[in-house]
Amino acid sequence: MPTVLIIDDNSAVAIALEVLFSLHDIEALRAASPDEGLALLERHQVDLVIQDMNFSADTTSGDEGRALFHAIRARHPGLPVILLTAWTQLDAAVELVRSGAADYLAKPWDDHRLIATVRNLIELGQAKRALGARLRSEARQRHDLERDFDLRGMVWRDAATERVIHLACQVARADVPVLISGPNGSGKEGIAAIIQANSAVRDGPFVVLNCGALPAELVEAELFGAEAGAYTGASRAREGKFEAADGGTLFLDEIGNLPLAGQMKLLRVLETGRFERLGSNRERQVKVRVVSATNADLPAMIRAGSFREDLFYRLNVIELRLPPLAARPADILPLAAHFLGAGKRLQAGAEAALLAHPWPGNVRELKNVMARAGLLAAGESIGAADLGLPPSPAMAAAAAAEAEPDRDAIGLALRRAGGVVAQAAAELGLSRQALYRRMERLGIARP
């Protein structure tokens, strides 16, 4: 059951509020003075405070209420506070709302409006506490990962990325092939490097081969090596990637581009650890951990006959699915700051533009955008225009939400919200303080 603390020296007011809350399943605590109220806050878990503005007889300045409010904010900064005030003290109440008070209610209050306001603020507070607990838990998990594993300088904040990193660290010690799937530029090589750094062969070489960057006729030579004269232009013997990676990890990027002949030989190496160089009949033996990656739909390629099913299952003992950058938005700003480097900072407009962009090129695109912005920006501050990103529907919607609402729009929102300012502000896309300022400027009285 939620708990409200009532701080008011008028016992009739406090009892009336206590009875009202009891009828709506809200527990109420009462305090007759600021000191008693602050003491109760130290001893009890309270979801919201309703406080008077004056406590001494014949005092109407509101100074005692100001002092109490600021004391509560100093000790419990996230606790919502509703001010009870006479109409003659509205200026003082509005001033405190600008300082962070949740709302104010004039005496005598409207029961329906008061209960609606209290419920909204309690639910908002509970949501904020739950979010804070989740963020603290994620921070602890991130700290534990960074403490216990070598993450190769990986930058992330999103829970989706953390799940992939955590699984990569879990499977790193197992001597089994790993397949990392995800779109181009999403950071698959970084995950492969984490697997290598935490594996039993972490002291061995980490060799990378992009199967999509080579002509089909040269892929086998790159993988397995070739003797002199094995193909046109092979003037001398050359070592393949498997030999180079012996005792370590071979990362095969874009494995879906490997031709069928190479797939067959790769399958044999995975099963036996043996292979021959092109142009040679002598078998060679290696011990290599294979990690592969693809942006292709390998099951669809199997159905089309362009990828071997037996190789797929051999590579796919463990699969790590890395989402596109747009699906892990909490990573965007930390990565942007990392790529931007020291001495440059992002303005709020630039951050909004980064979060609104769909990032079809994923992390690689973000890195290039930040490199360009860092070079072209005139000063240390990076604005949205410096990013060179196309305007997005989300940014247009954000700009529309920031448009100044007129008198009619504000009046309609307040009527729909039954006079609950916080609810009307949410409908208009404004903070409570911003709505109060507009109401004051337009001369709108509270309904």
Image: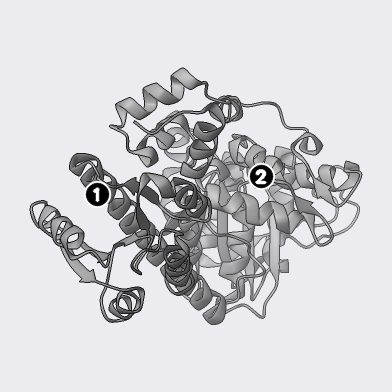
**Pointer 1: residues within 10 angstroms few (<14), some, or many (20+)?**
some
Q: Percent position (x, y) of residue 56? A: 35, 69
Query: Residue 411, can we see it?
Result: yes
How was the colour assigned to the protein in this rendering? one colour
- Residue drawn at point x = 56 percent, y = 60 percent: 291
Compared across the picture, whether 243 is left or right of 407 comes to: right
Compared across the picture, whether 388 is left or right of 130 comes to: right
Query: Residue 277, can we see it?
Result: no
Compared across the picture, whether 252 is left or right of 124 comes to: right
Mark 1: which amino acid?
Arg
Is tag 1's residue or tag 2's residue first in the polypeptide sequence? 1
- Residue drawn at point x = 52 percent, y = 35 percent: 440
Q: Quadrant of residue 38?
A: bottom left
The correct choice, above or below, for 30 with respect to 438 in the image is: below
Identify the residue position indicated by label 2 in the image. 351
Q: Percent position (x, y) of residue 393? A: 57, 24
Mark 2: which amino acid?
Glu
Outermost residue to the front = 58
Query: Which circle marks residue 119 in the picture?
Result: 1
- Residue drawn at point x = 54 percent, y = 43 percent: 324
Q: How many marks?
A: 2
- Residue drawn at point x = 38 percent, y = 44 percent: 87
SS state under label 1: helix
